[in-house]
Amino acid sequence: MTNRETLQEICSQEVDGSIYENYSGRGMMGKTCIGVSCSNAIAMIEAVSAKGIMGAKWDQLGKGYIVYWPNLDPDLLTIEHDGDDDFPDDGDSELSGEADVE
Protein backbone atom coordinates (compact mmCIF):
# COMPACT_ATOMS: atom_id res chain seq x y z
CA MET A 1 0.00 0.00 0.00
CA THR A 2 1.39 3.44 -0.89
CA ASN A 3 1.52 6.36 1.54
CA ARG A 4 -1.33 8.00 -0.41
CA GLU A 5 -3.45 4.84 -0.10
CA THR A 6 -2.68 4.64 3.62
CA LEU A 7 -3.81 8.25 4.09
CA GLN A 8 -6.97 7.60 2.06
CA GLU A 9 -7.76 4.52 4.14
CA ILE A 10 -7.34 6.44 7.39
CA CYS A 11 -9.56 9.25 6.05
CA SER A 12 -12.34 6.84 5.17
CA GLN A 13 -12.13 4.42 8.11
CA GLU A 14 -10.62 6.13 11.15
CA VAL A 15 -10.61 9.92 10.99
CA ASP A 16 -13.00 11.88 8.82
CA GLY A 17 -10.79 13.78 6.39
CA SER A 18 -10.14 14.62 2.76
CA ILE A 19 -6.89 14.28 0.83
CA TYR A 20 -5.41 17.56 -0.38
CA GLU A 21 -2.84 16.81 -3.08
CA ASN A 22 -0.91 20.07 -3.53
CA TYR A 23 -0.67 21.85 -0.20
CA SER A 24 2.04 24.43 0.36
CA GLY A 25 2.46 24.96 4.08
CA ARG A 26 4.10 27.74 6.03
CA GLY A 27 7.77 28.11 5.22
CA MET A 28 7.66 25.66 2.28
CA MET A 29 8.54 28.41 -0.24
CA GLY A 30 6.07 27.21 -2.86
CA LYS A 31 6.98 23.51 -2.58
CA THR A 32 3.86 21.34 -2.43
CA CYS A 33 3.06 18.13 -0.63
CA ILE A 34 0.18 15.84 0.27
CA GLY A 35 -2.06 16.80 3.14
CA VAL A 36 -5.33 15.89 4.80
CA SER A 37 -8.07 18.38 5.60
CA CYS A 38 -9.76 17.32 8.86
CA SER A 39 -11.49 18.55 12.01
CA ASN A 40 -9.11 16.85 14.48
CA ALA A 41 -5.40 17.23 13.69
CA ILE A 42 -4.22 15.26 16.75
CA ALA A 43 -6.41 12.24 15.93
CA MET A 44 -5.13 12.28 12.33
CA ILE A 45 -1.48 12.50 13.37
CA GLU A 46 -1.91 9.67 15.89
CA ALA A 47 -3.68 7.41 13.37
CA VAL A 48 -1.11 8.06 10.66
CA SER A 49 1.85 7.66 13.03
CA ALA A 50 0.48 4.27 14.09
CA LYS A 51 0.78 3.24 10.42
CA GLY A 52 4.42 4.36 10.26
CA ILE A 53 4.05 7.74 8.56
CA MET A 54 5.97 10.35 10.55
CA GLY A 55 6.95 14.00 10.13
CA ALA A 56 3.48 15.57 10.15
CA LYS A 57 2.89 19.29 10.50
CA TRP A 58 -0.44 21.08 10.67
CA ASP A 59 -2.02 24.44 10.04
CA GLN A 60 -5.34 25.70 11.32
CA LEU A 61 -7.86 26.59 8.61
CA GLY A 62 -10.58 28.50 10.43
CA LYS A 63 -12.88 25.73 11.66
CA GLY A 64 -10.63 22.84 10.65
CA TYR A 65 -7.05 21.80 10.14
CA ILE A 66 -4.78 20.55 7.43
CA VAL A 67 -2.22 17.95 8.42
CA TYR A 68 0.60 17.71 5.89
CA TRP A 69 3.86 15.91 5.29
CA PRO A 70 6.46 18.13 3.57
CA ASN A 71 8.98 15.31 3.11
CA LEU A 72 6.63 12.42 2.33
CA ASP A 73 6.57 10.82 -1.11
CA PRO A 74 2.93 9.77 -1.46
CA ASP A 75 3.78 7.13 -4.07
CA LEU A 76 6.26 5.18 -1.93
CA LEU A 77 5.12 2.12 -0.02
CA THR A 78 4.17 2.64 3.61
CA ILE A 79 6.43 0.76 6.00
CA GLU A 80 4.33 0.09 9.06
CA HIS A 81 5.97 0.92 12.37
CA ASP A 82 5.88 -1.90 14.90
CA GLY A 83 6.34 0.36 17.93
CA ASP A 84 9.77 -1.09 18.79
CA ASP A 85 12.33 1.69 18.48
CA ASP A 86 15.22 -0.44 19.72
CA PHE A 87 17.86 -1.83 17.46
CA PRO A 88 18.15 -5.60 17.32
CA ASP A 89 20.68 -6.93 19.82
CA ASP A 90 22.99 -9.01 17.65
CA GLY A 91 25.94 -8.80 20.03
CA ASP A 92 27.57 -5.89 18.20
CA SER A 93 28.46 -3.35 20.90
CA GLU A 94 27.44 -0.39 18.71
CA LEU A 95 23.92 -1.78 18.24
CA SER A 96 23.37 -3.29 21.66
CA GLY A 97 24.03 -0.08 23.58
CA GLU A 98 27.25 -1.37 25.15
CA ALA A 99 30.43 0.66 24.77
CA ASP A 100 34.00 -0.53 24.72
CA VAL A 101 35.65 1.64 27.38
CA GLU A 102 39.19 1.12 28.49
Image (spheres, helix red, strand yellow):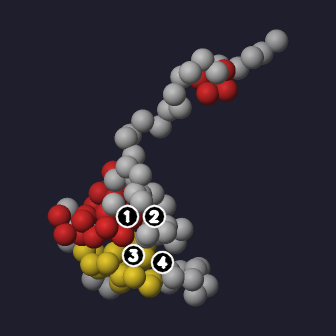
Q: Are marks 1 and 3 in contact (CB under 8 Å)?
A: no
User: Which residue is denoted by mark 4 in the rendering?
Assistant: 33
* Location of residue 56 by image quarter: bottom left
**SS of the residue under disc 4:** strand
User: Which residue is denoted by mark 2 in the rendering?
Assistant: 76
- Local packing at callout 4 (Cα closer than 10 Å; few below 14, some 14-19, many 20+) is some
Residue occupying the point 61% across, 27% down: 95
Q: Amino acid at mark 1?
A: Thr
Tell me the CA gap for discs 2 and 3.
15 Å
Which mark is first along the chain, 3 or 2?
A: 3
Q: Are marks 2 and 1 in contact (CB under 8 Å)?
A: yes
Which mark is first along the chain, 1 or 4?
A: 1
User: Which residue is denoted by mark 3 in the rendering?
Assistant: 35
- Local packing at callout 1 (Cα closer than 10 Å; few below 14, some 14-19, many 20+) is some
Residue occupying the point 20% across, 62% down: 14
* Location of residue 64 by image quarter: bottom left
Q: Amino acid at mark 2?
A: Leu
Tell me the CA gap for discs 4 and 1.
15 Å
Q: Amino acid at mark 3?
A: Gly
Q: Are marks 4 and 3 in contact (CB under 8 Å)?
A: yes
